[in-house]
Image (cartoon, rainbow, N blue to C red):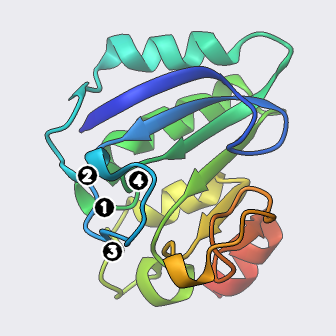
């Protein structure tokens, strides 16, 4: 998996001050996307153990509320396997901090077993440790700059109980 950047201090991609990981690769190609360069799976640099360690270390300060993973598209099948050890390590090292993920896919339509972006033995395990999932494609015609943590009205902020309920 490639990534475009690790931001060690973001206040726009979830509650509090967060570390953000922008992965590369996205097939959604939303019109008006703010991060179009990350559509290319080869954009940026390879995400190795060095970058994983950098991300984890950036999450250590007490003022960091958690980690946010966005893109590109974290739930592209090519990215999920690389993200699984990262999210598990984050959860193990920081049980009191939150993990947010943004996806242009819709949980019930795309990420459940048997659906197009569900990777057996991987997707469910990622969803098990995510505290907040912001789902849905960015739709330029529904753009709303007053929304917190979302770009368009169709996108949802799903907390862990909502994710569990929709996965049943």
Residue that appears at 67% across and 23% down: 93
Instruction: Give the distance between the C-alpha atoms of the residues marked 2 and 3, in whole angstroms.
Output: 13 Å
Specify which label sits upstream in the sequence, 2 or 3.
2
Q: Quadrant of residue 152?
A: bottom right
Residue 74 spot, x, y in % from top left: 41, 53
- Above/below status of 27 relative to 6: below
Residue underneath mark 2: 25
Q: Position of residue 87 (x, y in %)?
A: 53, 39
- The residue lying toward the viewer, choosing from 122 and 54, is 54
Quarter of the figure with residue 128:
bottom right
Q: Residues within 10 Å of mark 3 (few under 14, many from 20)?
A: many
Q: Toward which corner of the image does residue 10 lie, by quadrant? A: top right
- Per the model, the C-alpha gap separating discs 4 and 2 is 8 Å
Cβ atoms under marks 1 and 3 closer than 8 Å:
yes
110, above or below 129, in the image: below
Q: Which residue is mark 3?
A: 117
Tags 4 and 1 touching, CB below 8 Å: yes
SS for dot 4: loop
Residue found at x 47% / y 89%: 109
Q: Position of residue 133 (x, y in %)?
A: 65, 62
Instruction: Estimate the spatial distance between the alpha carbons at disc 4 and disc 3, rounded to whole Å.
Output: 11 Å
Q: State the residue in front, 51 or 72.
A: 72
Residue 76 in the figure: left or right of residue 150:
left
Q: Secondary structure at mark 3?
A: loop
Cα separation, mark 4 vs mark 1, equals 6 Å
Query: Which callout, 4 or 2, points at the residue further toward the start of the chain?
Result: 2
Residues packed near mark 4 inside 10 Å, few (<14), some (14 to 19) or many (20 plus): many
76 relative to 166 in the view: left or right: left
Q: Which residue is mark 4?
A: 74
Image coords of residue 114 (percent x, y): 34, 88
Q: Is residue 54 left or right of residue 62?
A: left
The image's mark for residue 76 is 1
């Amino acid at each position: 998996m490639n990534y475009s950047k690790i931001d060690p201090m973001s206040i726009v991609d979830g509650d509090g001050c967060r570390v953000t990981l922008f992965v590369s690769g996205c097939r959604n190609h939303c019109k008006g996307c703010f991060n179009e360069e990350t559509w290319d799976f080869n954009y940026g640099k390879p995400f190795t153990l060095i970058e994983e360690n950098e991300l984890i270390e950036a999450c250590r300060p007490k003022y960091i509320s958690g980690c946010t993973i966005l893109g590109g598209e974290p739930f592209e099948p090519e990215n999920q396997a690389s993200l699984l050890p990262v999210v598990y390590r984050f959860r193990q090292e920081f049980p009191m901090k939150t993990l947010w993920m943004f996806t242009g896919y819709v949980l019930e339509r795309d990420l459940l077993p048997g659906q197009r972006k569900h990777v057996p033995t991987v997707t469910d395990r990622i969803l098990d440790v995510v505290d907040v999932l912001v789902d849905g494609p960015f739709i330029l015609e529904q753009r709303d700059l007053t929304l917190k943590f979302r770009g368009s009205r169709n996108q949802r902020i799903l907390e862990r109980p909502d994710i569990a309920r929709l996965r049943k």
